[in-house]
Image (cartoon, rainbow, N blue to C red):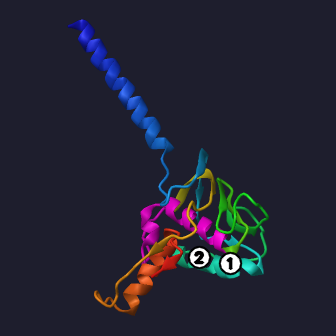
Amino acid sequence: MMKLKQYVLASVTLICTNLSSIATENISIVPKPNNYEFKEGKFTLSAQTKIVCSDKLKRTGELLAGYMRPATGYPLTVTSSNNGGGNIALKIISSEELGKEGYTLDVTPTGVLIAANTPTGVFYGGMSLFQLFPTQIASKTKVEDGTWFTPCVTIKDKPRFAWRSYMLDDGRYFNGCDEVKKLLDQMSILTLNYFH
């Protein structure tokens, strides 16, 4: 009887240890990135956070800020001058490995760097960052007492399929223009690139 109790206790301990390691290794991004590695610490978004980018990426920076401004209430100014820490930097690089839509995302306690070959890749990196924040970040109204942080992580990702689409039979199930625009926003968060 004593051996049975020890066996059950050892089994429960082993299962709990495995479950806790699984929980810390999962990432809350859809679709799941190809490569990611968690690091110590967290990045906290604040009212002083800026999105720093070149003129070529200004539209992408404004789109990312537009997703996060309503819930946070922060200005998230898009600028080309990087003075101070705690910013989100968007950068065009040259990497054959990433292709047209791939990106790297490096989140540290002092800031975030999203780098890609094209503005599309930078945008997809921004959507991955958006998904790392608490789910309330998707609110269309300001969330009172919201704490906006994301775990520190390094991600290198590119789509496995060039054609990632969604089809809507709007003739049969008429939703209207506003609903279709909401659907397109959701598609962009999930990195779907064709709409039928």
Between 34 and 6, the one nearer to me in the picture:
34
The overriding secondary structure of the stretch rendered in magenta is helix
Q: Please report the bounds of the magenta region as a residue range.
A: 120-147
Q: Is residue 33 left or right of residue 141?
A: right
What is the number of the mark on residue 78? 1
Q: Earlier in the sequence, mark 2 or mark 1?
A: 2
Find the distance from the CA under tag 2 to the CA under tag 1.
8 Å
Q: Is residue 193 above or below residue 149?
A: below
Tell me the quarter of the picture where residue 175 sits: bottom left
Q: Is residue 156 above or below residue 76?
A: above
Q: Is residue 70 visible?
A: no
Q: Is residue 22 left or right of residue 12?
A: right
Residue lying farthest to the left in this orientation: 1
Question: Around disc 2, counting alpha carbons within 10 Å, would you say few (fewer than 14), some (14 to 19), or many (20 or more)?
Answer: many
Q: Is residue 140 above or below residue 173?
A: above
The amino acid at mark 2 is: Ala
Q: Is residue 131 magenta?
A: yes
Between 49 and 62, the one nearer to me in the picture:
62
Residue 106 appears at what percent x and percent y?
67, 55
What is the number of the mark on residue 34? none
Label 2, secondary structure: give it. Answer: helix
Between 84 and 185, the one nearer to me in the picture:
185
Q: Residue at x 42, y 80 (%)?
A: 183
Residue 151 appears at what percent x and percent y?
55, 52
Q: Residue at x 68, y 74 (%)?
A: 119
Disc 2: which residue? 65
The amino acid at mark 1 is: Val
**Marks 2 & 1, CB-CB < 8 Å contact:** yes
Label 1, secondary structure: give it. Answer: strand
Q: Is residue 107 visible?
A: yes
Residue 131 appears at what percent x and percent y?
50, 63
